[in-house]
Amino acid sequence: MEEAITWLREKGISKAAKKQTRIAAEGLAKAKVEGNKAVIVEVNSETDFVAKNPEFTGLVDLIATAILSSNVKTVEEVMKLEVEGNTIENIIIDKTATIGEKLSFRRFELVEKEDNQVFGTYSHMGGKIVTLAVLEGTDEEVAKDVAMHVAAMAPVCATRSDVPADMVDHESKVIKEQVMNEGKPADIAEKMVTGRLNKFYKEICLEEQEFIKDSSVNVGTFVKNNGGSIVSMIRYAVGEGIEKKEENFADEVMSQINNTK
């Protein structure tokens, strides 16, 4: 029996290794909350068909649950976590052999909140876009509304203070170049730079974006009107930043059929 298990393991590792050069840009993101801890994860597959497979969705949930029960900080640490005597890494290898596609655990964020804070989560298109918001001093319904807004409007940061300095410097240089090319006087140009930079913040900062459910207020004001403040937000869009392989629908179906042979 032990030899048979070893043989199956080696076969699974071999199959997984052969698939490593493939592009896995589909899959699922998932947010899971347990008490004062929440996790958001992304696990990738090669096709959307597999992303809907119960074997795959179960794997995503298993990984999220394992992370919630730990204090891991890196993907490498997650891969070493054990679930019922098997590591996450080996479980993914086994699922790759079973399902017949490259599967990869891409990223996660583990968040802890204070007792006076609340989590808000939202999943769009069955896990293609998933968000996690942390608010203070308000309730979960408000937090969920904010999480929904994050999914729809894709803010880069929660507040101005969260915007990386290099991003602000780059945008300032671009704006100054634009204003100089317009030939405006120095005093007018400076005001235009300030005005356009403020517009830039309103586009990328959650707190300053027009609230999707009420455009008469920004998100920060909506939260404040409900007694709270924004602490943080995370938005995962499956496959973002991964170069995807172009395939038509028929080719994808045939690929699935061939993988099952």
Image (cartoon, rainbow, N blue to C red):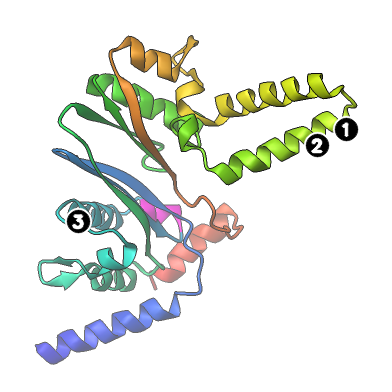
Does 101 sit above or below residue 181?
Answer: below
Residue type, mark 3 in image: Asn
Q: Which residue is mark 2?
A: 177
Instruction: Count neighbours of disc 2 (C-alpha within 10 A) and say few if under 14, some if 14 to 19, many if 20 or more.
Output: few
Residue visible at 43% across and 19% down in the picture: 219
Q: How many marks?
A: 3
Q: Which residue is mark 3?
A: 71
Residue visible at 74% across and 33% down in the picture: 175
Residue type, mark 1 in image: Asn
Work out whether residue 223 can be spotted: yes
Regarding mark 1 in the picture, which secondary structure is present there? helix
| Residue 60, picture quadrant | bottom left
Residue 181: assigned label: 1
- Left or right, 141 with respect to 104, comes to left
Which numbered disc, 3 or 1, marks the residue that appears first in the sequence? Answer: 3
* Magenta residues, start to end: 47-51
Residue visible at 50% across and 22% down in the picture: 208
- Left or right, 73 with respect to 150, comes to left
- Left or right, 178 with respect to 152, comes to right
